[in-house]
Amino acid sequence: MAMELERATKKRRGGIDDLPDDLIVDILSRLPAKSVCRFKCVSWRWRRLISHRDHRKKLPHTLSGFISRYYGPLNDDELVSIPHFDSIDGGEEDEEEHRLVPDPSLSFLLGYMSISPKDCCNGLLLCLCCKNSPRDESDYVVCNPATQRWIILPEIDDYDQLASIRLCFDPALSPYFHVFAILEDADGCITGVEIFSSETGGGATGRMVGLTKMITCGNLAFIGQSQGHLYYINSRNRDSSILSVWTLDDYCSRQWSFKYNISTSQLFGWTNMRLERKYNLIAIHPDCNMIFYVSRDEGQNTLLSYDMDRGEINSICNIRDPFWNPWDPCLPYVPVFMESLPDHA
């Protein structure tokens, strides 16, 4: 009986097992990263194919790590901002050619003495780059750390009013990206938004989506995208012991849906987070219900994750920057190898 069952199983799987490796990899390359991870369980052969370093550039990736910055010496009197990559992939290869970020310092951005990461979206990175000469000039640059291609953005018309700048890119929908420059007046009120489109090389139009509740500016307020939906996390107006999670399930209706509450005491061991600045929400996982935050304790900066479904906390790694600022970005990075930017090499 056992032998008959084994033969029947082999017969059912024969079609899959007979497929050549190249065809399997080609099929997997067209699937979402989350599905590819699940297919590791099909067989040991599939697991080896998916994990093989020669296939890493062909297959879709999920969250691989975080890009932040640290400060290094330019000379005896100056420090400059240098990008840094913290991997959450324990299987990262030592050989530079097989790393998902071959050059974490972004030295391929030629002509700049200081590079400050500002935003990251689906594999593209937005940086403020200070020139070697003249030293009082700078550019906003969008680059792909995986392919080392990059483009310089046009100057922002009202740079003195710039409050924030954000990058938007979805390779599943379009090879083009958009950059949003949010402007404010002297009173801190939003006065407008400049939008750059890589498709036209100039301006573009957009639309506004309001929030269900006013979002509090601070280290525990966060907006990000996960599993095809926009999320925002915020503490309640008068109750900092609770973080509320909302999603924008339907972009057309612009209606936010309440998901659940998270107790800050479960995350941080504190209840009044308005008096506590040791923690900073930084990201949500693109493929599952998991948030990431940084904890600073006695000069040690630790990156942690919280699984919202299981209620589990895990320590991932230490953040390198010794001058860590809770307002400095620690950006989630998902590598993408499509050629969506020009080659400056």
Image (spheres, grey):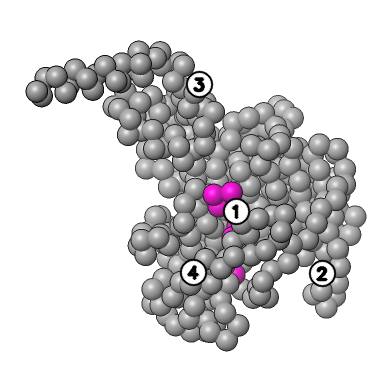
Q: Badge 3 local density, few (<14 within 10 Å), some, or many (20+)? A: few
What is the distance, in whole Å, between disc 1 and disc 3 at their CAs? 27 Å
What quarter of the picture does the N terminus occupy? top left
Looking at the rendered structure, the secondary structure element under dot 3 is: helix
Looking at the rendered structure, the secondary structure element under dot 2 is: strand
Amino acid type assigned to the residue bearing label 4 in the image: Tyr
As drawn, the label of residue 260 is 4
Looking at the rendered structure, the secondary structure element under dot 4 is: strand
As for residue 205 lying within the magenta part, the answer is: no
In the rendered image, residue 187, in percent from the top left (x then y), is placed at 83, 78
- For the question of whether residue 71 can be seen, the reply is no
Main secondary structure type of the part rendered in magenta? strand
As drawn, the label of residue 229 is 1
The residue indicated by pointer 2 is: 190
Work out whether 49 lies above or below 123.
above
Amino acid type assigned to the residue bearing label 3 in the image: Asp
Mark 1 or mark 3: whose residue is earlier in sequence: 3
Which residues, given as a range, are shown in magenta? 221-231
Work out whether 265 lies above or below 76.
below
The residue indicated by pointer 3 is: 26
